[in-house]
């Protein structure tokens, strides 16, 4: 954390609502922005100077949804949909140590800060069940790199193969017996660990906070969902889940509850201003109204949604009904990168293929707001980050205007969303501290990190081989059964627009 004073001079400050980037100086005291003024404004004599000449200054991007455990599974599963990704979890998450969790999170944090992302909401899968020590190790990784994060374990007390109605019975008998051994953790143990996490969290919660994440509604019993709700309310914690991400899970909701997943969550008293739903691709317009009225949030993950064939969320309609929509990257095993610029671009473009006129499409300034202020609200940091303004944390990204993406320099918002891919990120400061300079991370020994990852992968490839073989046997029957549910989804969609 920075404790001195810093004056940033000669930079151009993004004014997204007005599509401008005028010259401005920024005074930082400690970790907070104290003042923004005209070039040459007065500053304390002891202030360190950052020369931002030929730099465009934007708020640190905020990743509203990711999974750090996926960083060690980057690029796998070319033809996987969501169901095959979940099916594979017991393979690529198997035999991970706390050190593995730390290194995986550190790798992802480095990727994010190098591409201008300064905060993230991380749902961590710790197999076979979460631990206080494992989640704290993930938090330490973000702290060591210099990012902000909300860390939360993925909680589930129902195995995947029994969560989707009829799936287990559709598997060959031999495979039914094998998946029976892949049990979910008991609800009581998950509840105990969740309470301990919230009560014993070792990190500064203003920088690295902790939350609760019942991972997918059907992977949790109603009793356990209610327990998660109560624990979160008791501790004032955020609550995060994956809601109606694919058509298969939407059908599962109708079969299990006789209603949409969102409506069921409303009945359970879970929707509210501390609730964030990832994806929400297949929620109905009535669901959007429920979420908007409750003050809930959605983490939109356009790259992952398309990579997995899940669909295209109607973010225009969500925002119209008052839902706060942030932007996330999802995991490296389903989005393949943690690049918020790419997700901003696809969030903008995908809004244009829904049933809306060009006058209703998301604009570049709106998408920038979604990737900063809206994402910050979705992770519970909305009063501290997401803006470059007095009183906010000094999380600032400097884009090099000599980069080809900004030549010629015309409309800064359009160029950030439609042209930039992260290559122009020259400096990143978080809380007034420089963690990227000259396009290189300053807080991590990158060659050493690469060696650590390679050593981990050598071990995991060996110990996970048997699990991988089982997962590959399951792929065809899981795909066949889940694909057979798609016509049923079409029927529900027609009846519940």
Image (spheres, helix red, strand yellow):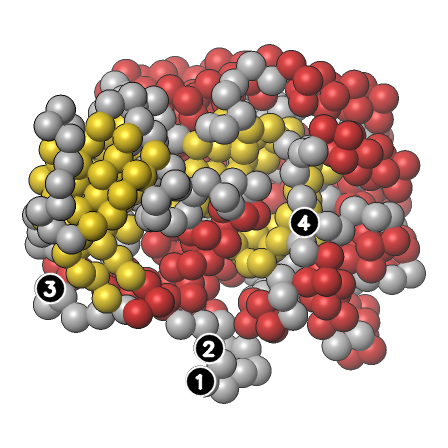
According to the picture, the residue beneath numbered tag 2 turns out to be 361
According to the picture, the residue beneath numbered tag 1 turns out to be 358
Q: Are marks 1 and 4 in contact (CB under 8 Å)?
A: no
According to the picture, the residue beneath numbered tag 4 turns out to be 273
Q: Are marks 1 and 3 in contact (CB under 8 Å)?
A: no
Location of residue 489 (image quadrant): bottom right
Q: Quadrant of the C terminus?
A: bottom right
Location of residue 385 (image quadrant): top left
Q: Are marks 3 and 4 in contact (CB under 8 Å)?
A: no
- Give whichever of 162, 353 is nearer the camera: 353
Observer-side mark, 1 or 4, equals 4
Q: Earlier in the sequence, mark 1 or mark 3?
A: 1
> Which residue appears at 46% of the width and 40% of the height?
384
Q: Earlier in the sequence, mark 2 or mark 4?
A: 4
> Which residue appears at 22% of the width and 28% of the height?
5
Measure the alpha-carbon separation of dots 2 and 3. Answer: 26 Å
Please tell me whether mark 4 sits on a helix, a strand or a loop: loop
Q: Are marks 1 and 2 in contact (CB under 8 Å)?
A: yes
> Residue 314 appears at what percent x and percent y?
59, 70
According to the picture, the residue beneath numbered tag 3 turns out to be 407
Measure the alpha-carbon separation of dots 1 and 4. Answer: 31 Å
Q: Is residue 362 above or below residue 145?
A: below
Q: Residues within 10 Å of mark 1 (few under 14, many from 20)?
A: few
Q: Earlier in the sequence, mark 2 or mark 3?
A: 2
**24 displayed left or right of 380:** left
Q: Are marks 2 and 3 in contact (CB under 8 Å)?
A: no
């Amino acid at each position: 954390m920075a404790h001195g004073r810093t004056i940033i001079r000669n930079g151009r400050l993004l004014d997204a609502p007005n599509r401008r980037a005028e010259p401005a100086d920024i005074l930082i005291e400690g970790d907070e922005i104290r003042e923004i003024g005209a070039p040459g404004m007065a500053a304390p004599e002891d202030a360190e100077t950052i020369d931002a000449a030929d730099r465009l200054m934007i708020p640190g991007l905020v990743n509203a949804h990711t999974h750090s455990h996926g960083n060690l599974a980057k690029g796998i599963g070319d033809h996987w949909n969501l169901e095959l990704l979940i099916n594979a979890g017991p393979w690529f998450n198997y035999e991970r140590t706390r050190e593995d969790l730390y290194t995986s999170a550190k790798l992802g944090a480095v990727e994010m800060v190098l591409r201008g992302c300064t905060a993230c909401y991380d749902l961590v899968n710790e197999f076979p069940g979460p631990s206080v020590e494992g989640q704290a190790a993930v938090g330490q990784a973000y702290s060591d790199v210099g990012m902000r994060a909300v860390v939360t374990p993925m909680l589930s007390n129902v195995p995947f193969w029994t969560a989707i109605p009829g799936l287990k019975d559709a598997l060959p008998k031999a495979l039914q017996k094998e998946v029976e051994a892949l049990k979910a953790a008991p609800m009581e143990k998950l509840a105990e660990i969740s309470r301990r996490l919230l009560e014993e969290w070792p990190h500064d919660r203003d920088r690295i906070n902790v939350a609760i994440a019942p991972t997918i509604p059907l992977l949790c019993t109603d009793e356990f969902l209610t327990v998660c709700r109560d624990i979160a309310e008791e501790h004032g914690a955020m609550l995060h889940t994956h809601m109606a991400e694919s058509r298969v899970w939407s059908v599962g909701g109708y079969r299990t509850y006789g209603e949409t997943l969102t409506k069921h969550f409303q009945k359970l008293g879970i929707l509210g201003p501390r609730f964030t739903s990832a994806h929400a691709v297949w929620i109905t317009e009535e669901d959007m109204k429920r979420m908007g009225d409750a003050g809930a949030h959605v983490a939109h993950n356009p790259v992952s949604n398309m990579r997995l064939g899940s669909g295209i969320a109607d973010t225009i309609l969500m925002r119209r009904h008052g839902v706060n929509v942030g932007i996330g990257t999802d995991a490296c095993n389903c989005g393949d990168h943690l690049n918020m610029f790419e997700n901003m671009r696809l969030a903008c473009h995908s809004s244009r293929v829904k049933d809306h006129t060009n006058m209703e499409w998301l604009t570049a300034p709106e998408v920038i707001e979604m990737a900063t202020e809206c994402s910050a609200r979705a992770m519970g940091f909305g009063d501290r980050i997401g803006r470059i303004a007095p009183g906010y944390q000094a999380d600032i990204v400097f884009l090099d205007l000599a980069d080809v993406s900004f030549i010629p320099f015309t409309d800064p918002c359009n160029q950030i969303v439609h042209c930039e891919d992260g290559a122009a990120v020259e400096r990143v400061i978080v809380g007034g501290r420089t963690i990227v300079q000259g396009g290189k991370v300053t807080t991590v020994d990158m060659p050493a990190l690469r060696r650590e990852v390679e050593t981990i992968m050598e071990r995991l490839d060996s110990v996970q081989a048997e699990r991988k073989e089982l997962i590959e046997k399951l792929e065809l029957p899981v795909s066949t059964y889940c694909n057979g549910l798609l016509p049923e989804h079409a029927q529900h969609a027609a009846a519940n627009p």
